[in-house]
Amino acid sequence: MTRILIAEDEPRISAFVQRGLESAGYATIVIEDGLEALDAVLAGDIDLVLLDVGLPGMDGFEVLRNLRGQGSAVPVIMLTARTSTRDTVQGLDAGANDYVPKPFKFDELLARVRSRLRETTPTGPVSIVQGDVTLDILSRRATVNGREVDLSAREFALAEQFMRNSGQVLSREQLLSRVWGLDFDPGSNVVDVYVRYLRGKFGHDRITTVRGAGYRWE
Ligand code: CA
C-alpha cells in the first residue's frame, strides 16, 4: 500500500487531507514536527511527502534540503502559502517535485499526488512538452523552440495547467482555483489578464478563447 506522510501542524488541514487520502485508498501518517518528519522519511517506507512550509522543530525547506542532502529521492509536494511566490521558488530550488498553494481543493491535491506517484524518475527532470513549448517543472524554465521564455511563478503555474490539459477547455473558475487558490474572488478578471501575458510570451494562437466556457491550449 502506498504510504503518504502528511507533515502539517494545523490539525484542521491535516485531518481534511488525511480523510481524503484514506478514502482514495492511501495509507497516511500525520506528523506535526519537522524534525520528526525528517526522521520518519529517512527511516524509509514513505512513498510521498506532503510538506508544510511552516512547521515546528524544523521548517519545511530545511526538512527538504536535509532529505535531498542525504540522498532521498522521495517525491515531495510542498504546501505553500497562497500568496507567497517566494515560498514556491524556494521550495522548488530546495528539490520539491511540486507545490500546492493553500488553500487548495482536495481534488487538486489528489491529482498532484497521483501524478507525482506515477512519475518513474522522481529525481530526473520533469518536463511537459507540447509541440515546440517545453516546461521544465523542477527548474521552472520554459522554452519555445529552444528559446527561453521568462515567466513569473503565477504565469508558470497557469501555463502548466494549460499544458497538462492541452486540447481541453478550462473554465476561469477551474483556473482560479488551481492556480490562485480556492477563495479568490470569482468575479476577478485575473485569469484573463494572465492569459494575455501568456499569449504575449508564447504567441497569440497558442491559447484559444472559447466563448462562455473558458480557454483552451491548442
Ligand atoms: Ca504550518
Image: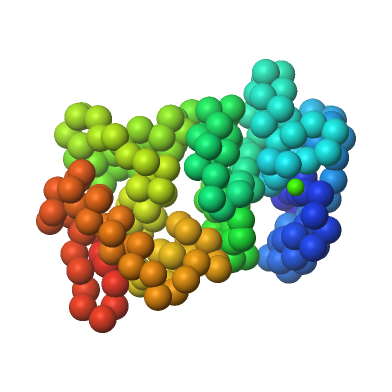
Work out whether residue 151 or residue 210 is closer to the camera in this orientation and state it.
151
Residue 82 image position (x, y, % from top left): 56, 53
Res. 136 visible in picture: yes
In this picture, residue 73 sits left or right of residue 57: left
Dividing the picture into quarters, in which one does residue 216 lie?
bottom left
Relative to 83, say whether 65 is above or below.
Answer: above
Q: Residue at x 35, y 48 (%)?
A: 155
Residue 144 image position (x, y, % from top left): 20, 37
Q: Residue at x 26, y 81 (%)?
A: 212
Work out whether residue 108 or residue 102 is closer to the camera in this orientation and state it.
102
Which image quarter is the C terminus in? bottom left
Residue 6 image position (x, y, % from top left): 76, 49
By what rule are the colours in the image chosen? rainbow
Q: Residue at x 19, y 52 (%)?
A: 199
Res. 22 visible in picture: no
In this picture, residue 131 sits left or right of residue 163: left
Dividing the picture into quarters, in which one does residue 207 lie?
bottom left
Relative to 27, say whether 216 is above or below.
Answer: below
